Amino acid sequence: MTIQLSTGVRNALLDSIETAIGASAILKVRTGAAPASPAAADAGTVVATLTLPADWMAAASGGTKAKQGTWEDTASDAAGTAGHFRIYAADGTTCHLQGTITATGGGGDMTVDNTNFAAGQSFSITGFTLTAPNA
């Protein structure tokens, strides 16, 4: 039998992710595929860097946890096609979370309004939700 978690345990697990990463996390959108794990060296060109709101995720509910507040940048760092994201502690160097990034409706772990970045363009993160096991 597969181990199953109660909704309360799933929610606590998800809320602990935001607590471990901390307030005002740094999100970097990068080109290409994500590294093998968050512990691996960064890969790809940084096309955008955002400081997320101090409370950047809503409280977990029903085994999911969604972005909170507005995640946008008025001027991207460089030109390129977004391929993955990494979320760092506020120090900007300790990576804790990574995943794929696609345009809205593209099925990525995180979605943006446009994956083709031009240096200086504005953009918005349109979707990001964490889902606990067996939710």
Image: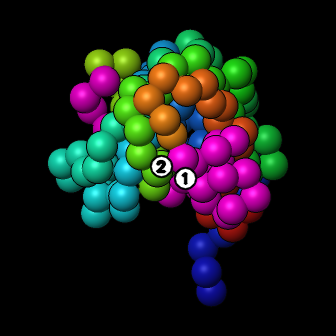
Q: Quadrant of residue 28?
A: top left
Observer-side mark, 2 or 1, equals: 2
Mark 1, other Cα within 10 Å: few <14 / some 14–19 / many ≥20: many
**Marks 2 and 1 close (CB-CB < 8 Å):** yes
The image position of residue 53, as x and y in percent, is 59, 16
Where is 123 relative to 5, above or below?
above
Q: Is residue 12 visible?
A: no
Magenta stretch: residue 123 in it?
Answer: no
Check disc 1 and report the residue beneath it: 101
Q: How is the image coloured?
A: rainbow
- Span shown in magenta: 92-116
The foreground one among 58 and 6 is 58
User: Which residue is at a point 56% across and 13% down the rendered structure image?
Assistant: 54
Residue type indicated by callout 1: Ile
Residue 43 percent location from the top left of the image: 25, 51
Residue 96: in magenta span: yes
Q: Quadrant of residue 65?
A: top right
Q: Which mark is residue 82?
A: 2
Quick check: can you spot residue 119?
yes
Report the front residue among 118 and 33: 118
